[in-house]
Image (cartoon, rainbow, N blue to C red):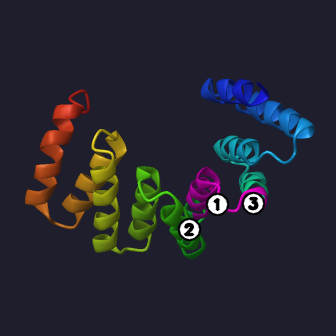
Amino acid sequence: HWNLLGTTLYDQRKLDASCEVYRQSLAIDPRNPTVWNELGIAEQARSHFAEAEQAFQNSLALAAGHPGALLNYGFLLCQQGQQDRAFQLLQHAIVREPLASSGWITFGEIFEAMVQSKLAVAAYRRAWELAPHDEQAGFRLAKMLQSSHQLTEAESVLRPHLARFPEQA
């Protein structure tokens, strides 16, 4: 129940309170990798990157293949410019959860940061194939196609994407 309260507070953007509740939960059960992962997410949202990294590491120490922790830690590392470490973590996440579009989106972000447009397009395309109703997957694929001058293909992604999400300007 503590985890649910922490998530509820996080969803209300009450980040300090959310982190406090996750820590209370961990005082009761310090071996819960899901709560460590949730704490990492909340700490990352507060821009407390060292605390977020430690929380993700704790989650992975308890459950080496925790897909959420692998993806979230990979995303944190990517944000911090540590693409090589992020790439290694995400490879593990993709092997464990090959149908998780979020992992492929994060791969796309890493490839984009490494200026590897073909690989970024391939990663975003895979995310879009796995989750065609995911707003981010379609947008990122179209944006990457457009920036790499694959304009006809970008249009072919944008038209159905905008049909699904017509409120986007």
Q: CA distance from mark 3 to mark 1?
A: 11 Å
Return the residue found at the far right: 27
Q: CA distance from mark 1 to mark 2?
A: 8 Å
Instruction: Tell me where residue 166 appears, x and y as whole percent.
Output: 20, 29
Q: Which residue is mark 3?
A: 57
**Callout 3 environment at 10 Å: few (<14), some (14 to 19), or many (20+)?**
many
**Callout 2 environment at 10 Å: few (<14), some (14 to 19), or many (20+)?**
some
Q: Which residues are magenta?
A: 60-77
Q: Are marks 3 and 2 in contact (CB under 8 Å)?
A: no
Quadrant hosting residue 124:
bottom left
Tell me the residue at 81%/30% (across/down). Answer: 21
Instruction: Tell me where residue 146 appears, x and y as whole percent.
Output: 19, 59
**Callout 1 environment at 10 Å: few (<14), some (14 to 19), or many (20+)?**
some
Q: Are marks 3 and 1 in contact (CB under 8 Å)?
A: no
Q: Identify which amino acid the numbered label 2 is placed on.
A: His
Instruction: Tell me where residue 61 appears, x and y as whole percent.
Output: 78, 61
Q: CA distance from mark 3 to mark 2?
A: 14 Å
Residue 116 falls within the magenta-colored stretch: no
Tell me the residue at 17%/46% (across/down). Answer: 158
Quadrant hosting residue 163:
top left
Q: Earlier in the sequence, mark 3 or mark 2?
A: 3
Q: Identify which amino acid the numbered label 3 is placed on.
A: Gln
- Element type at marker 1? loop
Disc sitting over residue 65 in the figure: 1
Quadrant hosting residue 122:
bottom left
